[in-house]
Image (cartoon, rainbow, N blue to C red):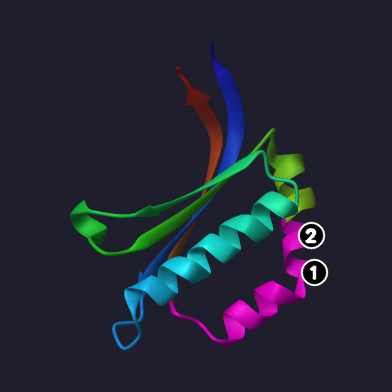
Amino acid sequence: GENIMHAIQFIVQPDVNRPRAETLTTMKKVAEIWKKSGSNKTTVATMTGGLYGAMSVVAYFDDVAHAGICRKKVNENPEISKILDDSTGEVLFENSYSEVITFE
């Protein structure tokens, strides 16, 4: 069936001076924080194509209001501050998707 929802994507270019595995571990932590903060689901991916080598976290929500509630919880989580203070990469983009339609 068709399911319309909202999503937020973070694209990170790993720091070349740090192990890629470290960045991937950080991305997984970020995804877990978003999930624990109430997102419906999260995904982590290594990208190819134009952003080859970048990594992505996507968090999915019922709608924009749901995303806002979860973002507030994420922002209040002390673990996010630790991750931002010891960054393993540069956030290239934060993309929001207002209509995510899934066909399964």
Label 2 – label 1 distance at C-alpha? 5 Å
Q: Secondary structure at mark 2?
A: helix
Dot 1: few (<14), some (14–19), or many (≥20) neighbours within 10 Å? few
**Which quarter of the rendering shows the N terminus?**
top right
Q: Secondary structure at mark 1?
A: helix
Name the residue type under label 1: Glu
Q: Are marks 2 and 1 in contact (CB under 8 Å)?
A: yes
Relative to 13, does residue 10 appear above or below in the rendering?
Answer: above
Residue matched to label 2: 73
* Picture disc at residue 76: 1
x%, y% of residue 53?
26, 64
In terms of image quadrants, where is residue 16? Answer: bottom left
* 10 with respect to 33 (left or right): left
x%, y% of residue 43?
50, 47
Residue 88 falls inside the magenta stretch:
yes
Residue at image position (67%, 50%) is 35
* 67 with respect to 8 (left or right): right
Principal secondary structure, stretch drawn in magenta:
helix
Relative to 22, does residue 37 appear above or below in the rendering?
Answer: above
* 46 with respect to 40 (left or right): left
Q: Nearer the viewer, residue 53 or 51?
A: 53
Is residue 45 at least partly visible in the picture? Answer: yes
Dot 2: few (<14), some (14–19), or many (≥20) neighbours within 10 Å? some
Q: Nearer the viewer, residue 6 or 23?
A: 23
x%, y% of residue 19?
34, 80
**Which quarter of the rendering shows the C terminus?**
top left
Q: Nearer the viewer, residue 38 or 91?
A: 38
Name the residue type under label 2: Lys
Q: Which residues are magenta?
A: 71-89
Residue at image position (35%, 85%) is 18
In terms of image quadrants, where is residue 56? Answer: bottom left
Looking at the image, which residue sits at the far top?
A: 1
